[in-house]
Amino acid sequence: MKKSDRTRQEILDATASSLATVGYTATTVKSIAESIGMQDASIYYHFASKDELVGQVLDIGTSLAVDAVDRALAELTDLKDPREALRVAIIAHAEAVLGGGDYPRANVRSFGQLPPELVSRHRKGHRDYGQIWMQLINDGVESGALRGDLNRSVARLIIIGALCWAIEWFDTGEEVSAADVGEHVFQMVVYGLSADQPQQHAVSV
Amino acid sequence: MKKSDRTRQEILDATASSLATVGYTATTVKSIAESIGMQDASIYYHFASKDELVGQVLDIGTSLAVDAVDRALAELTDLKDPREALRVAIIAHAEAVLGGGDYPRANVRSFGQLPPELVSRHRKGHRDYGQIWMQLINDGVESGALRGDLNRSVARLIIIGALCWAIEWFDTGEEVSAADVGEHVFQMVVYGLSADQPQQHAVSV
DNA sequence: TGACTTTTCTAGTGCGTACTAGATTTAATC
DNA sequence: GATTAAATCTAGTACGCACTAGAAAAGTCA
């Protein structure tokens, strides 16, 4: 009973690591098994199929990302500032996906390679996550803090997109941290690149 | 001589279409051949390998995207307005990748799935394309039109990322056009979502 | 038409994949 | 320590993949 749970966790971790670095296609059952010193057939004692295993890793990744954003929003002191809420959410997402563990990264990295069955399995999770952001934007527009002349769904997707794509170029070895990326995304999508906007605050990166 | 060129073009088109819709992994030589009524083996009379064929499709896609942005910038009337330059470039990119043909879309859609050999083959093309955007941002900052307190490389990658990720959710059947997406990206990253920024212009989408 | 070249097809190879069956070892229990 | 259960391994299957060799067909031009 104990041994099984430990091995199971080891398999999940190895799968998350592989998904996060090389993506779904290049993640083979054999490579997962090898990375933890097992035979590929032994994996099937713990998981019914590759996609079942991958699916569970993606579930964990989604939960971790949602939790990170939720926790950041819960710690907000000023509950009345929609821009600040957007800021902490964006930075929390950036840190979870870029600087965090393998699980959230596995989600983003593998997204475009998943077989249709796995995509539909996680559609609900993605929709729920999108809903968090939709709420933040709606609050901002309705309170007057955010402009209302843009399509809110498109705005939401652009923010998430800018953050998700960062995984393609972000390098942990560089001088720019995950939080820095989040701060940049926030500054750009909320206050804009244009100079002489009154509400921007200088960033020192 | 004539027949060969026509078939060759047909193969390239079919490959671009497949890459743009299902990505690199799901694009098999057999599926390409079937879509144009051929046997898979016949493909190898025209191309040495799958990756050679895919590589040529990606080359064409990069050229088309670069050309679209270059052409849009060349048509600029006011050469002194860096924000307007950024705007037409962003919209041109959006139209090329989202609304345009299969070739530019193939690039973005397959990006994360390519084998290392193909990635390095196209590294130069990507760097050249990034250079166009770097130039636009540098011009803006140096003329004072864009703020200088953000990391320019990060800003560039965020803009391109927001545009590239749009391929994951953009649906041609919707009421939002490719140019609309571009306009939204421009409005957000240049003027910001925040209300009461003086230089924004209302968008009606 | 007939000789020649270009193009496509038929029929296969070898390899890597996910996955299975059954023997074998390791761990827990009495 | 013997018995039973849990966990892993050995050895395979079937399938889809990129790719090859050589025969067959389709064009091309005198």
Image (cartoon, coloured by chain):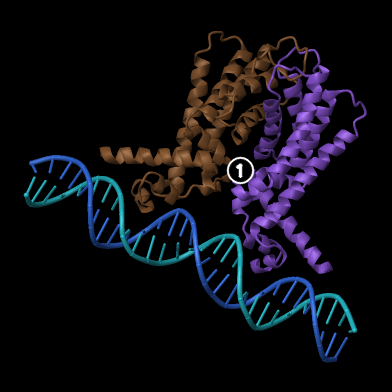
Chain colours: A purple, B brown, C cyan, D blue
Left or right, A105 with reference to B55: right
Q: In which quadrant is the N terminus of chain A drawn?
A: bottom right
Residue B152 visible in this rendered orientation of the protein: no
Counting every numbered tag in the picture gives 1
Query: Which chain is disc 1 placed on?
Result: A
Q: Amino acid at mark 1?
A: Gly
Image check: B180 left or right of A84?
left
Q: Residues within 10 Å of mark 1 (few under 14, many from 20)?
A: some
Mark 1 secondary-structure assignment? helix
Q: Residue at x 71, y 24 (%)?
A: A152
Up-down relation of residue A131 to residue A81 (above or below): below
> Going by the picture, which residue comes out furthest to the right?
A77
Residue A168, by quadrant, is top right
* Residue C20 image offset from top left, x and y in percent: 61, 70
Q: Quadrant of residue A85?
A: top right
Quarter assignment of residue A72: top right
Q: Which residue is mark 1?
A: A112
Q: Which percent across, then down, holds residue A78?
A: 91, 26
Residue A103 position, x and y percent, is 74, 48
Residue at 47% across, 34% down: B103
The C terminus of chain A lies in quadrant = top right
Residue pictured at 45% horizontal, 34% vertical = B60
Q: Position of residue A22 (x, y in %)?
A: 63, 50
- The answer to whether A20 is drawn above or below residue B83 in the figure is below
Examine the rendering and report whether any part of residue B90 can be seen.
yes
A111 left or right of A181?
left
